[in-house]
Amino acid sequence: MFNATEIVQFLMDFAPRSQPLGLRYFAAFEIDAEQVGQLVQQGWLRRLSDDAYLLRGDQPGIDGTIAYLRSHIPDLHVGGRTALEWHRMVHHLSFRERVDLWGDGCVSLPIWAVERLACSYYSHTLFDARMDQNYGLKPLAWRHVQVMVSVPERAILEYVSVSLELALIEGVRNLIGSLRNIRLNVLQTLVDHCPRRDVVWGLKFLAEDAGLNWAPRLRA
């Protein structure tokens, strides 16, 4: 069993920075919950919530927070407008970055994570069970390797699915008008597995109205 000094040195050398650590992370290195509690009491670790800890002086980063949440929420990924911004396909206009997260099932996000990400979480089913739920998800080379991000074709369907209210349509129209480099084969696969026909028809109508060359060829 490691003593406190050895554990602290190990964490300082090898623990990921800006990414909260759960008890499963410590258990993988034979560090039990009692030892973790002692490190909190000694001030070496800071407890964020029931199963989230950071080294003293560290702060949760955006990517590190999402990577932590992904270990607790099935199929969690960055989607919608945030994914389009991360792909640099649309401009980021907000003073503070807001993150759109998608996952499987209703969950209660820790308060510290909501405050750090200023996030929205969506759990409604957009694609049928015949499609691999990881289709159209991949990490970005310039972001955290454990953070999955929707490809633009999936992201635009996610964005439209939560933005069909009349008050938001103009913003959706402007965003869709900038998406000229869409891969039709990828979008078509996603559309074929999307039971939300209002989303599919809404995307097709707005894309055709914007004069995008892929829109007439999209089978809705």
Image (spheres, grey):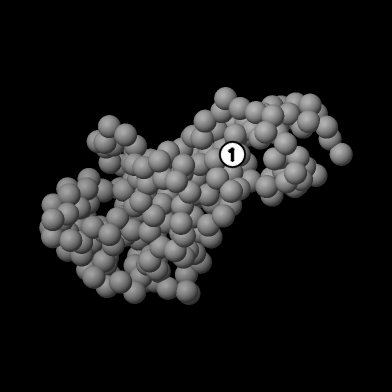
Please identify the quarter of the rendering in which residue 162 is found.
bottom left
Q: Nearer the viewer, residue 125 or 135?
A: 125
- The residue at the point 59 percent across, 48 percent down is 50
Q: Within 10 Å of the Cα at label 1, are there few (<14), some (14-19), or many (20+) other Cα atoms?
A: many
Q: Nearer the viewer, residue 147 or 8?
A: 8
Disc 1 marks which residue?
47
Quadrant where the N terminus lies? top right
Quadrant where the C terminus lies? bottom left
Q: Nearer the viewer, residue 35 or 165?
A: 35
- The residue at the point 28 percent across, 62 percent down is 161
Q: Is residue 107 left or right of residue 26?
A: left
Residue at the front extreme of this rendering: 41
- The residue at the point 42 percent across, 73 percent down is 128
Q: Is residue 197 left or right of residue 48?
A: left
Q: Position of residue 157 (x, y in %)?
A: 31, 59
Q: Is residue 40 left or right of residue 152?
A: right
Q: Position of residue 102 (x, y in %)?
A: 42, 56
Question: How many numbered circles does the render carry?
Answer: 1
Please identify the quarter of the rendering in which residue 114 is found.
top left
Say what amino acid the circle numbered 1 marks. Arg
Q: Position of residue 105 (x, y in %)?
A: 46, 65
Q: Secondary structure at mark 1?
A: strand
Q: Is residue 78 left or right of residue 30?
A: left
Examine the rendering and report whether any part of residue 144 can be seen. Answer: no
20 is higher (above) or lower (below) than 214: above
